[in-house]
Image (cartoon, coloured by chain):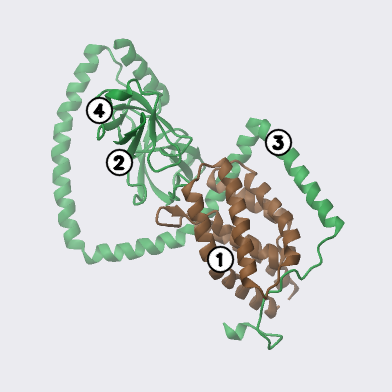
Chain colours: A green, B brown
Amino acid sequence: MSFFIRHKKSAALKPKANPYPSRSPRWRYRLGFTLIAIGLLGGILRLHKPFYDGIEQRLFEGTAWIQAGFIHPFQETRALLKNTHVFMHLREEYERLSQENEKLKWQLQTLGALHHENGILRQHLHIPIVEQCGHLTAKILSSPYDGLHHFFLIASGDKDGIEKEQPVIVKEGVVGRLEKVGAHVSRVLLLNDSNSRIPVITSTSQQKAILAGDGTFLPTLVYVGDVRKIQQGEQVLTSGMGGIFPAGLPVGIVDEITNNKIRVRPYVPFKSIEWVHILRLHPEGFREELNAALRAE
Amino acid sequence: MKIFLHTLKTLPFLTVLFIILGGCSLRIGNYPLLPALFLIPIYYWLIFRPDWLPLWSLFGIGIFYDALMGSELGFSSLLLVLSGLIGYYIRPILSSQHFFLIWGIFCCYSLCYLMIYGLLFSGGWALLFSWAYGIVLYPLVAWSLSHLHLRLQSYV
């Protein structure tokens, strides 16, 4: 580096504070004008929602694209190191995957019978059989899960056929839903974000509620039918109401109940996941199925 | 050489963007480094080279940060432009000889910024930890910035 630097003075380099006289009225005038312009323009744009949403969407796509480009080399390096590790333990990995494959084959056989039984029950209850939802697996680009920001950026977008509000899950349970969908990058709103609301049901006491994120690591249950019936350690599942999440997806476990405030510990290890699955539900078909089920009840 | 000088003037903007992009996925323990981390280069440039970080630049950085973090567009811009205003009055009382004074004022500035930021986002402990990380990391980041700034400047 030293050959690149040409020192003009032999003295030690130190930054000099306030090298410019700045108490000029012109500067103050310019700042005041800028503040007023920002206030006026921002207020007008914010009130005109379609215009604001359009700008927000474009800015999101642009910034997410820059973020993805910035993170890409780091992720590739990490993947390379991980691949080296996997390559070194190839034999053990092969054995583990073979065992897992056998287990999955067995589970698939059991599920086949259940699927058949489900079809017969649907016929008896006159519930229309809607098209099965597919899923898309997407890589997480960035995950600032840190108590202040609760979202993931994922490397999938419009081009992959995903849509806003689709549920995002991993094998442990519900992660959240798609908040913004760009062309190649999308943002997942996690279930503990203060804007997240998920209709849930408790497994044992069968109490319907809404899981509301509040910016902490443990979201709370609100609008509970009867708080006294809920037990600590009870499983919380999605109830299927609301038309976004299908019923029966695991969400978390009731962690603590204090002063009628119920906190749920999510099953998903947000810090360590690298991939997520996006359920490609068809909202119309899903709502139709839900309404038919409610009518049947 | 003139082109290089003009390119050098974008250094503050680029360093702030670099820290936002790099710090976005970083955390220590369960708590974030941002937003206090990106206040360090902003404070540094507002104090030492305010002419290289003009208002439009602060506005752009704020919009970029809000769009990336999914918060209300323009909120950070407003706070950063106000920071520019405060920096304008604070700058005359600072001197490069008193590093602890500069550091102390950064502590107050970042605390005020995060308190206002906390009104919009329910950060709580996360914001407090972010502030603490910002204070601890300030000497390291400021030292790196000063070397980058002065060496490149001396080259020009």
- Marks 2 and 3 in Cβ contact (< 8 Å): no
- Mark whose residue sits in front, 4 or 1: 1
Chain label for disc 1: B
Q: Is residue B1 above or below residue A292?
A: below
- Marks 2 and 1 in Cβ contact (< 8 Å): no
**Horizontal arrangement in the rendering, residue B36 relative to residue A226 (left or right):** right
* CA–CA distance in space, label 4 to label 1: 49 Å
Which comes sooner in the sequence, label 4 or label 3?
3
| Disc ID at residue B138 | 1
**Residue linked to disc 2:** A267
Q: Quadrant of residue A42?
A: top right
Label 4 crowd (10 A; few <14 / some 14-19 / many >=20): some
- Marks 4 and 3 in Cβ contact (< 8 Å): no
**Residue linked to disc 3:** A43
Which comes sooner in the sequence, label 4 or label 2?
4
From the image, which quarter does the N terminus of chain B lie in?
bottom right
* Mark 2, secondary structure of its residue: loop
